[in-house]
């Protein structure tokens, strides 16, 4: 049986072995700077280096992202990132943690525990029969363009967040097309969104869509560049 898989872009490889360990800066030494091939090293808040795989964007063989898929990371890496997120989030006093689906759930419970909360509030993509459309919003993302998925808040959880301050938790903020609609929805529901914490800020972190004030309230453990392909490897795209 033959397959018709397209040829991979130069200097990319399967992600199987990525996100499994935190390295030291000494292990990378002179390899921190571009051009990069196969992976991009990023420096974490509080120390350590995590190598991210390079993934070309659909329809743009010369454009790529350095990605994180949190539910494929090792337990040790998730624990390290969650602890770093907690260190960042302690400066923002809130009543509840609100986790964004799906990969935000990887961090939300551990973050809530580290901040002294006994529970957290999950949003969800799956519509249960008792859900209401007015407690939902449509979102998109850089890795699932045009998906137009709808995020819901369970009506039973509305009393927990209404009139209270919350911190949004997700794996990443990239275009802002997921976080901004959720932020708007909760604000309409009389929820005070005091900020957000993520493992990865990709590119400019959705500043154009989130706006300067909201984007400034998003804290990230590490920055992940958007990439452009040159003859000798992948380079970070210039800031706009």
Image (spheres, rainbow, N blue to C red):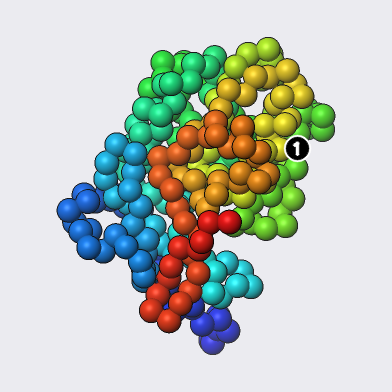
The answer to whether one can see residue 127 in this image is no
Q: Position of residue 174 (x, y in %)?
A: 57, 49
Residue drawn at x 29%, y 36% is 46
* Location of residue 165 by image quarter: top right
Q: Position of residue 12 (x, y in %)?
A: 42, 72
* Location of residue 11 by image quarter: bottom left
Q: Nearer the viewer, residue 9 or 101?
A: 9
How many discs mark residues in the rendered view? 1
Quadrant the C terminus occupies: bottom right
Q: Position of residue 160 (x, y in %)?
A: 64, 15
Residue drawn at x 53%, y 17% is 94
Q: In this view, does 90 lie to the left or right of 2?
A: left
Q: Position of residue 231 (x, y in %)?
A: 43, 81
Q: Give the residue furthest to the left.
A: 26
Q: 194 above or below 104?
A: above
Q: Give the residue furthest to the bottom.
A: 2
Residue drawn at x 37%, y 61% is 40
Mark 1 crowdedness (10 Å alpha carbons): few <14, some 14-19, many ≥20: many
Q: What element carries label 1?
A: strand
- The residue to which callout 1 is attached is 137
């Amino acid at each position: 049986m033959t397959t018709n898989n397209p040829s991979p872009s130069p200097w990319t490889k399967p992600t199987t072995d990525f996100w499994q360990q935190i390295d030291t800066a000494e292990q990378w030494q002179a390899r921190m700077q571009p051009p990069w091939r196969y992976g991009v090293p990023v420096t974490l808040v509080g120390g350590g280096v995590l190598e991210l795989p390079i993934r070309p964007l659909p329809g743009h063989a010369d454009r790529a992202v350095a990605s994180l898929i949190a539910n494929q990371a090792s337990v040790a890496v998730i624990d390290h990132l969650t602890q770093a997120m907690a260190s960042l989030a302690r400066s923002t006093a809130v009543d509840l943690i609100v986790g964004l689906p799906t990969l935000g759930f990887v961090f939300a419970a551990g973050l809530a525990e580290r901040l002294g909360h006994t529970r957290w509030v999950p949003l969800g993509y799956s519509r249960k029969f008792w859900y209401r459309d007015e407690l939902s919003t449509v979102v998109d993302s850089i890795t699932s363009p045009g998906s137009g998925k709808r995020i819901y808040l369970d009506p039973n959880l509305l009393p927990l967040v209404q009139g209270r301050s919350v911190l949004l938790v997700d794996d990443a903020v990239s275009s802002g097309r997921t976080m901004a609609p959720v932020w708007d929805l909760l604000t309409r529901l009389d929820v005070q969104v005091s900020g957000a914490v993520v493992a990865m800020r990709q590119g400019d972190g959705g500043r154009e869509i989130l706006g300067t004030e909201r984007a400034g309230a998003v804290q990230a453990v590490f920055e992940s560049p958007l990439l452009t392909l040159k003859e000798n490897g992948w380079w970070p795209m210039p800031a706009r």
